[in-house]
Image (tube, grey):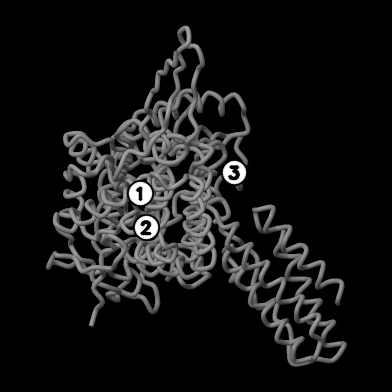
Amino acid sequence: MTRKLKNYIGGAWVDSAGTEVIPVHNPATCEVLAECPESTYADVDNAVKAAQAAFEEWRSTPVLSRAQYMYHFKGLLEERFEDIAKVMVQENGKTIDEARGEARRGIESVDFAIGVPLLMRSDGVEDISSGIDETTLRQPAGVFAAITPFNFPMMVPLWFLPTAIVCGNTFIVKPSPQTPLSMELIFELLEELDLPEGVINLVHGGVQASMSVMEHPGIVGVSFVGSSPVAKIVYETCTKHGKRVQAQGGAKNYIAVMPDANMEASVKNIMGAAFGCAGQRCLAAAVAVGVGDAYDTMKNELVRYAQNLKVGYGLDEKSQMGTVISHAARERIETMIQKGVEEGAEVLLDGRKVKIEGYEDGSFVGPTILGDVKPGMQIAKDEVFGPVLSLMKANTFEEAVALINNSRYGNAASIFTNSGKHAREFKYAVKAGNIGVNIGVAAPSASFPFGGQKESFYGDLHGQGMDSIEFFTERKIVIERWT
Amino acid sequence: MSSLNTFGAVLSFAIQLEADFAAYYHQAGNAARASDAEKRKSKLERVRRENVVEITLEPIEGLDEADYVPNFNDTSAAGQAAVERIAAQFYQEVAPKINVKQAERALERCGQEHAALA
C-alpha cells in the first residue's frame, strides 16, 4: 500500500483533512513513491494557528540561540547528505551529482542564516535633534510561508526557512506535490532540533493549499519560486491580501559567445548550463548566441559534446543527465521542439523519443540542439524548461545584446569572451538580474540576492542575501528624548 | 571509453578504492596503512560533499575505471607496491581533470601518499 504523506504542524506529524491525493512518481522508474495529500484551507489554518501561537516565545528567544539551532541543523544535513541527495534523485529525476550540488547549495543557505545575529544589527544616530536620538530596530514580522517548486525541492525551501526563523519569525513550507519527499526528510531532521512547537510547519498539497496560503490573513509574507504566469498570480493574490511577497518566475536565459572566447572552455560550461538538471532550472541556458565567426565553431563543438552526454537514471554515478519531471513535461517539451522545427529551426541534435535501457517508460528527453533559430519563433521566446538549447547568430556584440534585451524575461544572461570591454558593456547594458561572465549558470551564492527582472520576478526584495533580511524583518524607527 | 565521466563518478570511485585499500591492509595485517586508507576515504567523502557545485558539473573525458583495477589478492610486499602504483597513477591522472582546486589538491595528496608506498 502506498504511503500517504503527513503534514507537520505544531510539532507533530498529522493527517491532512483533505481526501484527495496526488501520486508522487519516480520519473525514471515510474514507481509511485508516495501519495501527497491535497491539503485544505483547514490544514493551512491549523498551521497558521500553530505558527502564530509559537511566535511570541520564539521572537523573544535570543537570536544567538535561534542561530544555534541552525548550527545543529547544518550538522545533521552534513551527516545525512547522501540520503538527502538520493531522495532528490528519486523524486525529481536529476543526477546524483546535481542532487549533491543542490544539497550543498541548501546548506550554504543554512550557513548564511547562522550569520543572522550580525546581519540583523541596525543603526542609529545620536542627537538627530538636540538631545534626541534616533535608531532603527529590526524585528521579526510574524508567520511567513514559502510555496516552492519541483526542480530544487531541498534548496529552494532552504533559501527561506532558515533565515526567516533565525530572524525570529515562524514558518510554513508548502512544497511541490511532485517532489514533497525531500522536504519530508528535511523536516524529520528539523524535528531532531527540538525547536518550540509551531516554529516550523509543513503543509503538503497543490493549488488548494497554495491558494489557502496566499489568502490566509494570518500569514504576513510569502516567498514563491515557479513559472512566471503563476508568479504573477501569486504576487497579485498576496498583495491583494495585504502580504509582502517575493515571487520568482521563469526565464529564457541567453548566452552570448564572442569570437575571442576560449571556445573549448566555453562549450564545456555551456553544456552544464543548458543540460544540467535536464534544463529544468530557472538559470538554464536556453539560447546560445554565436557572434560572427563564433557561431559555426560553437555549433559544431556543442553538438559534439552534447551527443556524447550519457543520459540515464540519476542514481547511476555515470549518468550525466537525468529525466524531466513527468511524462506530461516530456510531451510539452517535445511539442515545443516540433513547433520549432515547423517554424524553420534546424534540428542539430534530437533528444525526442530517447529510450534508456531498463527505464523505457522513464520521462527522458535527450539533449536537443536547434540551429538557425530566429527571434520570432516560439522556441526563442517561451520557456521550455527542458534540455533544449537554441542557437542564434548575431553579426555584432550590439546585435547580441539587443536579442537578449528583447526577451520578456530577465533572469540571467551570460557572455563568454576574453574582452574586458565587452564583458563590461554586457554587465552594463543587459537587462537581467544575474549576469555571468565566462560562467554559464550565474547562480548567486547564499550571501547575494537572487536577481531577476522583467517577467522573471514579481516583488521588490529578492530571495537570499541582505534582501532576505529585509524581507523577513520589520524596521521600526525609535526616536527618543530623555530629559 | 570514459566511464569516470562526472565529478561524482570520479570521487565515488576514489572513495571505493580507499575502502578497498583499507580492507586489503587489514587482511595483510598492516593496521597503520589500513587506518591511512580510511582517513583518505573520509577526506574524499568530505571533498565530494563540499565541492560539488554547478561549475564542477562539466563533462569529464578520457578516464576509464578499467585502467585502475589493483590486484587486491596479492598481499606480498611486491603486491603491495603494485597496488600502490596503480592508485598513485589513478590520482595523478584524475586530479588535473577536476576543475575545483580544493578537490584537485586533495586528489593530488592522495596520489602522493600512494606513490610514497609504491
Residue A219 position in % (x across, y down): 24, 44
Q: Is residue B80 left or right of residue A376?
A: right
Quarter occupied by the N terminus of chain B: bottom right
Sequence-first disc among 3 and 1: 1
Q: Residues within 10 Å of mark 1 (few under 14, many from 20)?
A: few
Vertical placement of A191 versus A387: above or below? Answer: below
Q: Return the chain for callout 2.
A: A
Residue A40 position in % (x across, y down): 14, 58
Asked if residue B112 shows in the view, the reply is yes
CA–CA distance in space, label 3 to label 1: 57 Å
Sequence-first disc among 2 and 1: 1
Q: Residue furthest left?
A: A19
Q: Name the amino acid type tagged 3.
A: Met
State the image quarter where residue A190 is shown. Answer: bottom left
Same chain for the residues at labels 3 and 1, yes or no?
yes
**Disc 2 designates what residue?**
A196
CA–CA distance in space, label 2 to label 3: 54 Å
Residue B106 position in % (x across, y down): 72, 61
- Please report contact status of discs 2 and 1: CB closer than 8 Å, yes or no: yes
Q: Return the chain for callout 1.
A: A
Q: Nearer the viewer, residue B94 or A365?
A: B94
Q: Is residue A436 left or right of residue A168?
A: right
Q: Residues within 10 Å of mark 2 (few under 14, many from 20)?
A: some
Vertical placement of A117 versus A406: above or below? Answer: below
**Disc 3 designates what residue?**
A263
Q: Secondary structure at mark 3?
A: helix
Residue beneath the point at 44% across and 62% down: A193
Q: Name the amino acid type tagged 1.
A: Glu
Total tally of numbered discs in the picture? 3
Q: Nearest to the eye among marks 2 and 1: give it.
A: 1
Q: Secondary structure at mark 2?
A: loop
**Disc 1 designates what residue?**
A57
